[in-house]
Image (cartoon, rainbow, N blue to C red):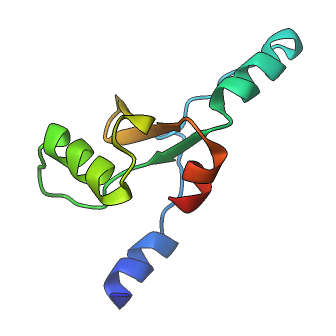
Amino acid sequence: MDSDFIDRLQKISLTEEDGEILEVRSTQREKILEKCSLTLLGCFLTTRPYNLRAAKAMLQTAWKLGSDVRIIDVEGGLLQFKFTLESQLQWV
């Protein structure tokens, strides 16, 4: 793997500006955890603009999951990947 890429990965961290604190009441906790249990969050490590529609299609093709994975643009380049099976999440 490219050493520059690995260096950038190791320097990733959330700041106050990046994160938003969400309070989850105990009555909702189980429901929310179940809803998010097959979810990954990620982003592209690039400063160049990219076509989000093309990127989504490329990932679905590369992962060979088609419509079994939903890719949602959360905000500010953050993507949410929702899988239908735990084995798919583990594979990715």
Q: Position of residue 58 (x, y in %)?
A: 22, 52
For the point 13% across and 49% down, the residue is 50
For the point 54% across and 40% down, the residue is 16
Picture quadrant of residue 57: top left
Relative to 77, say whether 46 is above or below: below
Residue sitting nearer the eye, 80 or 76: 80
For the point 55% across and 60% down, the residue is 91
Relative to 55, say whether 23 is above or below: above
Q: Is residue 69 visible?
A: no
User: Is 71 placed left or right of 86 in the picture?
Assistant: left
Q: Position of residue 74 (x, y in %)?
A: 39, 30
Residue sitting nearer the eye, 34 or 5: 34
Image quadrant where one finds the N terminus: bottom left
For the point 53% across and 58% down, the residue is 13
Q: Is residue 55 visible?
A: yes
Relative to 28, say whether 88 is above or below: below
The residue most toward the right is 26
User: Is 13 placed left or right of 72 in the picture?
Assistant: right
- How many numbered marks does the figure carry? 0
Q: Position of residue 70 (x, y in %)?
A: 40, 33
Relative to 22, say whether 25 is above or below: above
